[in-house]
């Protein structure tokens, strides 16, 4: 673990997708504001919304409370299709410890 960010989120501003998830993007800024905060949260935008330069729906803000100074971008993982997920649904996995 290389960073912990504490963010307060307004429940009135959150929107959920059809699966019950609220996809949120967290931004960490180089400078702090007048309240000592350097992080903000906004509802995730689609590619079309970003290309249309739609305003972000900010839902909260906060601050980095701890870091070891080593943050790395996560590697992209390809998503499985529904068909491949269904074919794996009954598969036994003897290598798991439970």
Image: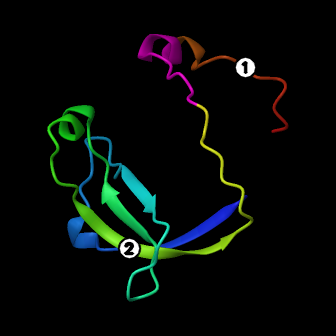
Question: Along the horizontal axis of the image, is 34 left or right of 11?
Answer: right
Residue underneath mark 2:
61
Q: Is residue 41 above or below residue 54?
A: below
> Helix or strand or loop: what does disc 2 sit on?
strand
Q: Nearer the viewer, residue 41 or 18?
A: 41
Question: Along the horizontal axis of the image, is 62 left or right of 21?
Answer: right
Disc 2 to disc 1, how far (Cα)? 43 Å
Q: Is residue 7 above or below residue 88?
A: below
Q: Position of residue 12 (x, y in %)?
A: 21, 71
Q: Nearer the viewer, residue 93 or 53?
A: 53
| Mark 2 surroundings: few (<14), some (14-19) or many (≥20) residues within 10 A | many
Residue segment shown in magenta: 76-86
| Mark 1 surroundings: few (<14), some (14-19) or many (≥20) residues within 10 A | few
Q: Nearer the viewer, mark 2 or mark 1?
A: 2
Q: Nearer the viewer, residue 47 or 16?
A: 47
Q: Residue at x 34, y 52 (%)?
A: 22
Q: Position of residue 6 (x, y in %)?
A: 52, 74
Residue 62 falls in which quadrant of the image? Answer: bottom left
Q: Is residue 31 above or below residue 22?
A: below
Question: Along the horizontal axis of the image, is 66 left or right of 95?
Answer: left
Q: Residue at x 50, y 23 (%)?
A: 79
Residue sticking out furthest to the bottom: 35
> Helix or strand or loop: what does disc 1 sit on?
loop
């Amino acid at each position: 673990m290389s960073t912990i960010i504490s963010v307060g989120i307004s429940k009135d501003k959150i929107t959920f997708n059809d699966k019950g998830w609220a996809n949120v993007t967290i931004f960490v800024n180089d400078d702090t504001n007048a309240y000592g905060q350097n992080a903000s949260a906004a509802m995730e935008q689609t590619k079309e919304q970003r290309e249309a330069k739609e305003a972000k729906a900010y839902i909260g803000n906060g601050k980095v409370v701890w870091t070891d100074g080593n943050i790395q971008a996560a590697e992209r993982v390809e998503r499985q299709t529904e068909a491949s997920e269904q074919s794996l649904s009954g598969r036994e996995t003897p290598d798991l410890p439970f």
